[in-house]
């Protein structure tokens, strides 16, 4: 039987503090020089939760604790390199200081001042869903 072609599994994290979130100014393609949420691919044999904590540390220098799942984003065109599905977590900082990686420079951005037109991947939609979730203070799930 031929091996089925399946989407790549990814995780993204909205690392929050008060009314700010960590975004990366990307230094790599795709979306070089645009803003993105920290995240990356789940490695074979690891849980999505471990991948999210690992990717947060690698891309931002922050050790985080996962609090909630905002949703699963699976638009086949969300990443121009391949078909992927991402589980998006909300996380809070346990320890560490912001530091960049080869992928980009992290910084804190006020939710009121984010330029959504300058965002890569489907991260504009994810952040807007997060803002809705934050306002509702409840569980959020989007299938759109």
Image (cartoon, rainbow, N blue to C red):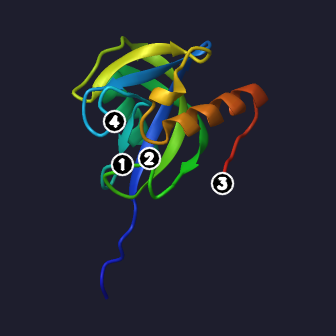
Residue corresponding to mark 4: 31
| Number of residues whose C-alpha sits closer than 10 Å to that of mark 3, classed few (under 14), some (14–19) or many (20 or more) | few
- Identity of the residue drawn at 36% across and 41% down: 40
Report the side of 24 relative to 67 (left or right). Answer: left
In 3D space, how far apart are the residues under numbered discs 4 and 2 (Cα atoms)?
24 Å
Name the residue tied to disc 1: 42
Please name the residue shown 46% across and 38% down the image: 12
Task: Kindly check if marks 2 and 1 are in contact, taking CB atoms under 8 A apart as contact.
Answer: yes
Q: Is residue 4 visible?
A: yes
- Observer-nearest residue: 94 or 9? 9
The earlier-in-sequence mark between 1 and 4 is 4
Residue 47 appearing in the image? no
Write down the residue under mark 2. Answer: 48
Which one is earlier in the sequence, the residue at label 4 or at label 2? Answer: 4
Q: Earlier in the sequence, mark 2 or mark 3?
A: 2
Q: Which residue is mark 3?
A: 143
Give me the C-alpha separation between circle 1 and circle 3: 22 Å
Q: Mark 1 or mark 2, which is nearer the start of the sequence?
A: 1
Mark 4: give few (<14), some (14-19) or many (20+) Cα within 10 Å. Answer: some
Which residue is the extreme one toward the front? 117
Q: CA distance from mark 1 to mark 4?
A: 20 Å
SS label for mark 2: helix
């Amino acid at each position: 039987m031929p091996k089925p072609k399946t989407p790549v599994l990814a995780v993204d994290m909205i690392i929050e503090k008060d009314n700010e979130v960590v975004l990366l100014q990307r230094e790599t393609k795709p979306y070089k020089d645009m803003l993105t949420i920290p995240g990356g691919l789940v490695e074979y044999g690891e849980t999505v939760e471990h991948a999210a904590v690992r990717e947060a540390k690698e891309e931002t220098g922050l050790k985080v604790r996962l609090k909630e799942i905002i949703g699963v984003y699976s638009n086949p065109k969300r990443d121009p390199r391949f078909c992927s599905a991402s589980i998006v977590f909300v996380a809070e900082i346990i320890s560490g200081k912001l530091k960049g990686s080869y992928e980009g420079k992290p910084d804190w951005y006020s939710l009121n001042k984010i330029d959504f037109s300058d965002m890569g991947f489907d991260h504009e939609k994810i952040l807007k869903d997060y803002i809705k979730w934050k306002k509702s203070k409840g569980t959020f799930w989007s299938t759109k």
